[in-house]
Amino acid sequence: MITTNRLKNLDLGTLRSFATIAEAGSMTRAAARLFMTQSAISMQIKRLEASLGLVLFERTAKGMVTTSTGEQLLGYAIRLLDLNDEAVGRLTSQDYEGQVRLGIPSDVIYPYMPDILKQFNRDYPRVQIKLSCANSKELKQQLKQGSLDVILATEKNPDGGGEVIGTQRLIWTGADGGNAWKQQPLPLGMSKSCAFWPSAIKALDSAGLEWIDQVTTEDFTAAEAMTAADLCVCVELGCALITGRAPIDHGGLLPALPDYFLVVYCADDTPSVTVSELMGYLQRGFA
């Protein structure tokens, strides 16, 4: 006689928590993004592991990392959640139309903005996002002139009128396994218009460390390429690293850097529904 195991159903809410932890690398950050308590999200994962009889995460010095079986489940979870969200978004969202002009500094587009924009487009398919990239100072000027509806700025001392959605420590970055940071004078690869340039120079001068400027263009991608090639070092937000660059483990040989705030500014005191919604997506995405 052939018998079959009782089929188990995966809870979508639990899968969303699981996928968010895998992306954020931390239960604390995942709970903040999902507006849940850490204890609640922890209980969800314990029940999921017990139900499947599998260990889905391992805790490392870099945070929570999926196991090999957890990585397999993650692929299924993303597909299931995408299908669920697409169905719910198409069937229940109001038929908003129009355009939202969004400004973002180029150095914080990755890794979060692609997912934020993808989710917003899924939920508001008839709202067009027009994206502009510039440094925070220029974006605030464009906002004041009426060229943009909402911006995300990186600031050490935020002005009034903005909403702080996160705080990130500046870090020294270089090529993965590189040695440029050991050179004297220190080769620095940053554009002069970068919001972090004054903090980097002040930290180096205060520490009495000599430095040279290796990048003369205002294009941030040039600094990225030079840094990834181990020709110089850079200063970036810890959340904005992409392939080719890594935090420098300098053991205190380079000076400490300050925190910077992620601040959302809106052109209108009473923004439209779509602008307000996009601001919410930014807040959750960078939590």
Image: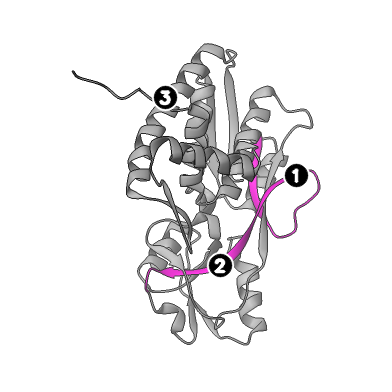
* Span shown in magenta: 149-177
As drawn, is 217 to the left or to the right of 147?
A: left
Q: Which residue is mark 1?
A: 162
Of mark 2 and mark 1, the one earlier in the sequence is 1
Marks 2 and 1: which is nearer the front?
Answer: 2
Q: In percent of the image, x 38 and y 57: which residue is there?
A: 243
Q: Nearer the viewer, residue 58 or 267?
A: 58
Task: Look at the image and tell me whether residue 27 can be seen.
Answer: yes
Q: CA distance from mark 3 to mark 1?
A: 44 Å
* Relative height, residue 29 to residue 11 (above, below): below
The residue positioned farthest toward the left in the image shown: 1
Q: Secondary structure at mark 2?
A: strand
Tell me the amino acid under the disc marked 2: Ile
Tell me the amino acid under the disc marked 1: Gly
Q: What's the mark number on residue 61?
A: none
Q: What's the mark number on residue 9?
A: 3
Of mark 3 and mark 2, the one earlier in the sequence is 3
Tell me the amino acid under the disc marked 3: Asn
Q: Secondary structure at mark 3?
A: loop
Q: Position of residue 261 (x, y in %)?
A: 68, 55
